[in-house]
Amino acid sequence: MHKSKKIVEAIILAGGLGTRLRSEIGEFPKPLAPTRGVPFLQILLNYLHSNGIKRVILAVGYKWELIEAAFGTRYKEMDLIYSVEDKALGTGGALKLALEKTNEEQIYVLNGDTLFTIPLADLSAIHTSKKSACSIALYHMTHNTRYGNVLLDGDQRIRNFSEKGEAAAGYINGGIYLLQKAALDTFKTGDVFSFETDFLTKKTSELNLYGQPFKAYFKDIGVPEDYHQFEKDLNQEPLKHLH
C-alpha cells in the first residue's frame, strides 16, 4: 500500500571495505574516509538531515565499531541505529538485515560511498505515482566506462541494466533508492546476495522498478581519483553547507 506521507527513515549501506581507497585512507571503513577534515559519512548524514530524515539505519560490518565511536546513536536530530553483519552478506543481504530495524514500509536506501544531492521528496513523488516497488535516482553521464547504464521505457519504467563498460553516454544508477520493504520478501534474512545483481537486475521484468533522472551533484568516492576530486568539490557551492 503506497501512502503519500513523508518518509523519514533511511538506510545507508556503510559496510564497504574500501579496498580501492586503502592507499589513500588506510585500514578504515570507507564511510570514514576523511574529506577535508570530516568523515564522508558526516557529509551523507548532513544531506539526509537537510532532507528531513529522522531515523538512519547504518548497515555496517568491517570495523563498524569505529563508525559507532565517531557518531554514536544520535546525530543532529536523527537517531542512528546500527545493523551489524557478523559475516559479509553482500549489499542485498546487508540491506535485508537492516530492514528488520525499520519501522516504515517505505525506506530510502543510500550507498555509503556516494553523494547525490537530489531532493528526496522528488523521488518519493514518482515512487508513489507509479506504485513502484523500487525507484532509483538516475544521473546522466556523458563519458561512462565505470558504470552500467539504466534503460527506461517511455513511462520511466526500468527495462534493463547494461553491463559496466558496454555503454558510453546515458543514465547510471545514482545510488539512491526508495524501496518498498515487501519487495525483498522473497529473500531471507541471512541470505548472501547482491542488491544490484540479484534483486534489481534479475527482477526487472517481474517488479515495477522506476527510474527518475536528476540534475544534481554526483560523486562516488570509491576510487582515489574521484575521492580527491570530491575533496576539491567541497570548497564549492552547492556543497559547502554539507561540510
Image (tube, helix red, strand yellow):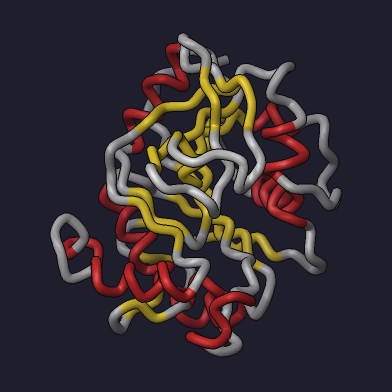
Residue 192 falls left or right of residue 31: right
Residue 128 falls left or right of residue 81: left
Residue lying furthest left: 237
167 is higher (above) or lower (below) than 134: below
Query: Looking at the image, how many numbered discs can be counted on the residues?
Result: 0
103 is higher (above) or lower (below) than 19: above
Pick whichever, 138 or 36, lies toward us: 138
Instruction: Report x, y in % for residue 147.
Output: 55, 48
Instruction: Report x, y in % for residue 241.
Output: 17, 62
The structure residue drawn at horizontal position 60% and vertical position 28%, both measured from the top left corner, is: 180
Instruction: Report x, y in % for residue 57.
Output: 55, 55
Q: Quadrant of residue 46?
A: bottom left
Name the image quarter holding the N terminus: top right
The structure residue drawn at horizontal position 46% and vertical position 78%, both measured from the top left corner, is: 33
The structure residue drawn at horizontal position 28% and vertical position 38%, both measured from the top left corner, is: 215
Residue 14 shows in the view: yes
Q: Quadrant of residue 89?
A: bottom right
Residue 10 shows in the view: no
Pick whichever, 55 or 94, lies toward us: 94
Instruction: Report x, y in % for residue 119.
Output: 29, 38
Residue 149 falls left or right of residue 121: right
The structure residue drawn at horizontal position 40% and vertical position 40%, both measured from the top left corner, is: 139
72 is higher (above) or lower (below) than 11: below
Name the image quarter holding the C terminus: bottom left
